[in-house]
Amino acid sequence: MSDNCLTIAVDGPAASGKGTLSRRLARHFGLAYLDTGSLYRAAALKALDNNVALDDEAAVAALAETFEAELLDDPRLRERGVGEAASRIAGLTEVRNALLTFQRKVAYSAPGAVLDGRDIGTVVCPDAQVKLFVTASVDERARRRHKEMAEKDPMVTLTDIKADILRRDARDSSRDAAPLLQATDAHLLDTTNLDIETAMNAAVSLINSVLAEKR
Ligand code: CDP
């Protein structure tokens, strides 16, 4: 951490609204934004495209270290199967280590950054000045993700999406390597009954009050 750098860590389960919120927080505070889930998704997509087994730790870690930056803009990253594969490779320690340096470089480059993921406040940036843990009920998260997915795939049902989310939550929370966990010094933001504007206002005032306390 450096004095001329503000790092905001935003963690939470799948489809909790942390991505939209983090992107807007970055704009609001004039910081860079990194969706760390897209790194896991890109490594997973690369493995799927190259027929690399998702449990081949060394091979997937090598892909995580070398994938092209353009892959982060590939629309296939948001596909259901890629989210599922990302959650599987995210349990591999070597893969997580391969992505750590890049995440920290973004987090600690002036003027700073908002990073969203699962382990930002606990592992990637344990010294972030502000940590948020964004959550919502599983039904609300399934409803949001279904709305997003149904535009691309009208056949997908709410029941399918809820099952995906429950499976990923269980895997992300129970793994040994950097599990999804609220850091002890993270502030909980439950967005179940909040629209994006209200969630954004709540997050901005929380962040401002944490920063005012530190001054
Ligand atoms: O957008 P959504 O919340 O569905 O997922 P994501 O943030 O794109 O992350 C996809 C998967 O990557 C998650 O299910 C996690 O298993 C993994 N991930 C992680 O382990 N650590 C992170 N910092 C970010 C994502």
Image (cartoon, rainbow, N blue to C red):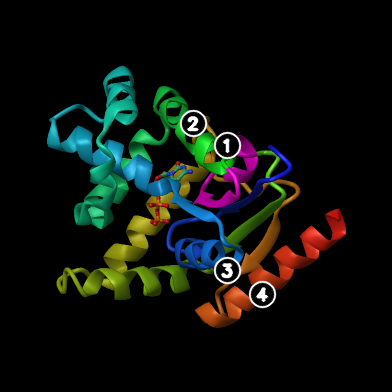
Question: Mark 3 — residue?
Answer: 28
Question: Mark 1 — residue?
Answer: 124
Q: Is mark 1 within 8 Å of ligand 1?
A: yes
Whole-angstrom CA distance, mark 2 to mark 1, is: 7 Å
Where disc 2 sits, the SS reads helix
Percent of width and height locating residue 187: 71, 59
Q: Residue at x 74, y 66 (%)?
A: 208
Amino acid at the residue labelled 3 = His
For marks 2 and 1, the one nearer the N-term is 2
From the image, state whether disc 4 or disc 3 is nearer to you.
3
Q: Residue at x 23, y 73 (%)?
A: 150
Whole-angstrom CA distance, mark 3 to mark 2, is: 26 Å
What residue range appears in magenta?
Answer: 110-125
Give the answer, above or below, for where 89 lies relative to 5.
above
Question: Mark 2 — residue?
Answer: 100
Residue 35 placement, left or right of 83: right
Q: Name the foreground residue: 205 vs 89.
A: 205
Amino acid at the residue labelled 2 = Leu
For marks 3 and 2, the one nearer the N-term is 3
